[in-house]
Image (cartoon, rainbow, N blue to C red):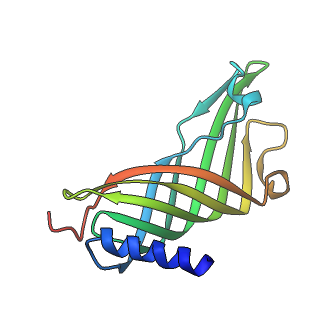
Amino acid sequence: MRKLHILLLLFLCSQYSYSQLFFDLGFKGHLSTTWLINANIFEDPDIVHKPSIGHGIGGKFGINFNEEYQIVGEVLVANFNQKFSFSESSDMKIKSIEMNSLDIPILFRSNSSDGGYFEIGTQYSMVKQVNETLANFDTEGQQDNSKDFDKSYFSALIGFGGYMLGWDN
């Protein structure tokens, strides 16, 4: 019975698909704003989140069902940053957190004919190192705080954009 269901599913897929399956490999990079959201810190009016930039580099492997729909697996080495400032007894104190991770997203992607795309999926992240830098504190400098963060976690992702290179349009 199970084999019959699989056979029926394959038959239906072959009847309603109009293109051959093909694969693609690619190089990927990103530059983005990053935010560390913690309710205790985010809602405190004395702590100000500063604009912070993160970046990453890696590669992707896509399974294309046709030119429009694709399942994409990626591997990215990513960097996340967050800076805070707050005043304490007339001194302006600055704290910076930098996190390095290995991210593995799996995404369903829809490509448009003009080079744009929309993607949605999940991501598994493995935290490699977390450094905290303090300025204007009694003990200044950088320390490794990796033990205070989860070693791995899952995320939900939504993305959109367009190709800069390698697209006919």
Q: Farthest residue to the left: give it.
A: 169
146 versus 34 height, above or below:
below
Nearest the eye: 9 or 24? 9
Q: How many marks?
A: 0
> Which residue sits at x=43%, y=64%?
29
Residue 21 position within the rendered picture, expressed as x and y whole percent measured from the top left = 35, 79
- Looking at the rendering, in which quadrant would you find the C terminus? bottom left
Residue 70 position within the rendered picture, expressed as x and y whole percent measured from the top left = 39, 66
Residue 52 position within the rendered picture, expressed as x and y whole percent measured from the top left = 54, 43
The answer to whether one can see residue 60 in this image is no
> Which residue sits at x=77%, y=28%?
40
| Horizontal side, residue 141 vs residue 160: left or right | right
Q: Quadrant of residue 123?
A: bottom right
The answer to whether one can see residue 118 in this image is yes
Residue 62 position within the rendered picture, expressed as x and y whole percent measured from the top left = 42, 73
> Which residue sits at x=66%, y=37%?
37
> Which residue sits at x=73%, y=55%?
131
8 versus 56 height, above or below:
below
Q: Quadrant of residue 12?
A: bottom left
Q: Quadrant of residue 13?
A: bottom left
- Looking at the rendering, in which quadrant would you find the N terminus? bottom right
| Horizontal side, residue 29 vs residue 128: left or right | left
Nearest the eye: 28 or 139? 28
